[in-house]
Image (cartoon, rainbow, N blue to C red):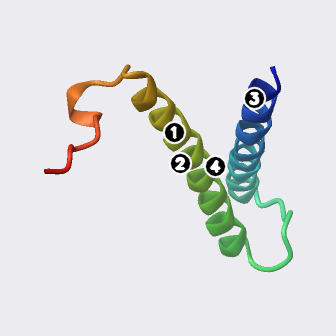
Amino acid sequence: MMARLAALIVLLIPGILAAFGIKLIRDTFFGVHILPGALWFQFICGILFTVLGLGFFAGFLLNRDRKNGKVAPRFQKKKES
């Protein structure tokens, strides 16, 4: 039970980061300043947060599915000779 709770917390943090990144991108299009500085800086931070959050989430799921053997052959790890 504790392992599932820890996994939920590990996935919750990047999910919130990605959601905040999407909010920054949306606010940039409407001209709302959330972060200090120029709007282009806010847009770049939004893209960075979104990519990092979704990338961590996708990597976590791929690693879990590889461990359980539930991925297509092209996503399986290459065996070393």
* Label 1 to label 2: alpha-carbon separation: 5 Å
- Image quarter in which the N terminus is found: top right
Which numbered mark, 1 or 3, is in the foreground of this view? 3
Rounded to the nearest angstrom, the CA distance separating label 2 from label 4 is 5 Å
The residue labelled by disc 1 is 58
Q: Amino acid at mark 1?
A: Ala
Q: Earlier in the sequence, mark 1 or mark 4?
A: 4
Measured in 3D between alpha carbons, the distance from the residue under mark 1 to the one under mark 4, in whole angstroms, is 9 Å
Residue that extends furthest to the front in the rendered view of this protein: 81
Closer to the chain start, of discs 2 and 3, is 3
C-alpha span from label 2 to label 3: 22 Å
User: What residue is shown at x 40% (from left), y 31% (from top)?
Assistant: 66
Image coordinates of residue 25 in percent, x first then y, are 67, 54
Q: Which residue is mark 4?
A: 53
Secondary element at image label 2? helix
- The amino acid at mark 3 is Ala
Circle 1: is it few (<14), some (14-19), or many (20+) Cα within 10 Å?
few
Q: Residues within 10 Å of mark 2 (few under 14, many from 20)?
A: some
Label 2: which residue? 55
Image height of 29 relative to 44, above or below: above
Query: Circles 1 and 2: CB distance less than 8 Å?
Result: yes
* Callouts 1 and 4 close, C-beta under 8 Å: no
Q: Which mark is residue 3?
A: 3
